[in-house]
Image (cartoon, grey):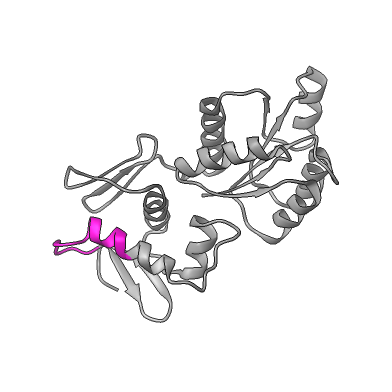
Amino acid sequence: MRILVIEDEKKLATYIKKGLEENHFAVDVSYDGEEGLFMLKTNEYDLVVLDILLPKKNGLEILEETRKNGKDMPILLLTAKDAIEDKAHGLDSGADDYLVKPFSFIELIARIRALIRRGKVHYQTELTVADLSLDIAAHRLYRKGQPIDLTNKEFALLEFFMRNLATVLTRTQIAEHVWDYNFDSITNVIDVFVNRLRNKIDKDRTNKLIHTIKGVGYVMSEEKP
């Protein structure tokens, strides 16, 4: 899952980005409204965390323009404006939720997960492929009941594979959904992480789950393509 955070307070934006990445999201950050709107127009995001009081273009303008452009991803307004009238205006402008600063990160992540579940009918927090089981909420992975430790990026990569079972994924698709805006997809980082993941879930097992499609990318499947 890829999230865009548009927040001009750099310390807060860094805090949110770090926390979301620890929860296995790919996160892009923008510090002003014009850049944030440009990123929204040129990239696909699963959710947006949007401050209202931004330089160059405010959050409500971004919200209204984003909805007019047909983008329907969940948008959570994050702001110091706590009046009932402000909340009502934000929600009426197209926001899906409204969280007032200062806030608890536990509440922020809970609201984000709720919005993602609400927006995606088939969003599941427990994924299973063959004897591999991934618990998103508990951040745990098991194969044949045996726990396997993953880094945050390995976890995000595996989740993307499992949510796209039997679908061939190009390196570009993987980069867009698992890494952030600044990732250089020309490097072999994706191949390195896929190999690390294979070593953890497929090594010494007869039924391999991650397969290479030469010249294209990778696919997760119970059967070899």
What x and y, as percent, mark residue 18?
Answer: 52, 41
Which one is in front, 115 or 60? Answer: 60
Give the image quarter of residue 213.
Answer: bottom left
Give the image quarter of residue 61.
Answer: top right
Residue at 39%, 35% (x, y): give it.
137
Which residue appears farthest toward the top when viewing the image? 84
For residue 225, above or below residue 120: below
Q: The C terminus lies in which quarter of the figure?
A: bottom left
Which residue appears farthest toward the front when viewing the image? 11
What x and y, as percent, mark residue 50?
Answer: 70, 39
Give the image quarter of residue 58.
Answer: top right
Which residue appears farthest toward the bottom when viewing the image? 215
For residue 176, above or below residue 132: below
Residue at 56%, 24% (x, y): give it.
104
- Count how many numbered circles sit on residues in the image: 0
Q: Which residues are magenta?
A: 195-208
For residue 28, above or below residue 10: below
Left or right: residue 103 versus residue 67 is left
Q: Is residue 83 magenta?
A: no
